[in-house]
Amino acid sequence: MVQPDEVDGARRFAKKLGVAHRIIHTDEVMNEEYCSNPPERCYHCKHLLFSRLIEVARERGLACVMEASNADDTGDYRPGLRAVSELGIRSPLIEAGLTKAEIRAISRERELPTWNKPALACLASRFPYGERITVQKLGQVLEGEEYLLSLGFSSCRLRYYGKLVRIEVPEDEIGRLLEDAMRRKVAAKLKRIGFQYVTVDLEGYRSGSLNETLTQEKRRTGR
């Protein structure tokens, strides 16, 4: 599921640059290898997506398909990059060796409106591996995160554990989240969405925090 604001933003950005914008539907939620949410979920999702984009590129006589992973992405668990490699997708930002910070600096220099845009990731990344992904669950996460952002938090993640949700906000914003009035307001909203227990991660927001369990398992088993 793509956040509605992201679709609108992409459309506006494409118009500003004078390039064509087209929405491609791939229906990942109909794919069992995606919905069952194994550690390789991102591989299956990206393989499905890029295979479809290759078809579109061929229909339009385009030479290649590109994607926007950057040099920082190569240091985390990113099974989707295997699909990128297998299908011959180009990753120009990785090829140029550009990090997220460098991309932001260049974007700001060129006055691109996205230079300070908060980092985003697929909503499926909010679910521990093995937790089945459904449209309803994705909707819960989306509604909760949009609410937190509407309260002025610069970024956030809702990590889904059934009836329990773990909130991540930037470390320097945790204090504001835990202020009595804010805490009560957020808890009430998330309970209305369908969560029974609302918790806050005291380490704050960090990209790919659910991959930490994979790292711990590798350390334990040596694999």
Image (cartoon, rainbow, N blue to C red):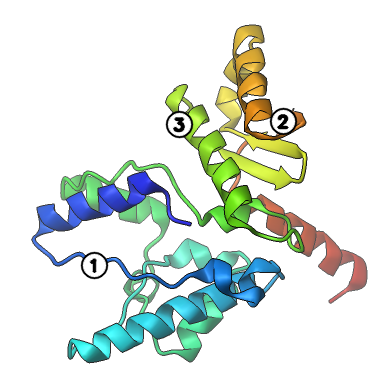
Q: Which residue is mark 1?
A: 22
Task: Give the Cα distance between marks 3 and 2.
Answer: 16 Å
Task: Give the Cα distance between marks 3 and 1.
Answer: 29 Å
- Residue extending farthest to the left is 18
Residue 127: image x %, image y %?
68, 54
Above or below for 63 versus 43: below
Numbered disc in front, either 1 or 2: 1
Image point (60%, 50%), residue name: 136
Q: Which residue is mark 3?
A: 154
Mark closer to the chain start, 1 or 2: 1
Above or below for 48 versus 189: below
Q: Secondary structure at mark 2?
A: loop
Q: Residues within 10 Å of mark 2 (few under 14, many from 20)?
A: some
- Identify residue type, mark 3: Ser
Residue 63 at least partly seen? no
- Residue extending farthest to the top is 181
Q: Looking at this view, is 139 or 66 the one in front?
A: 139
Q: Quadrant of the C terminus?
A: bottom right
Mark closer to the chain start, 3 or 2: 3
Residue 13: image x %, image y %?
19, 52
Q: How many marks?
A: 3
Mark closer to the chain start, 3 or 1: 1
Q: Which residue is mark 2?
A: 202
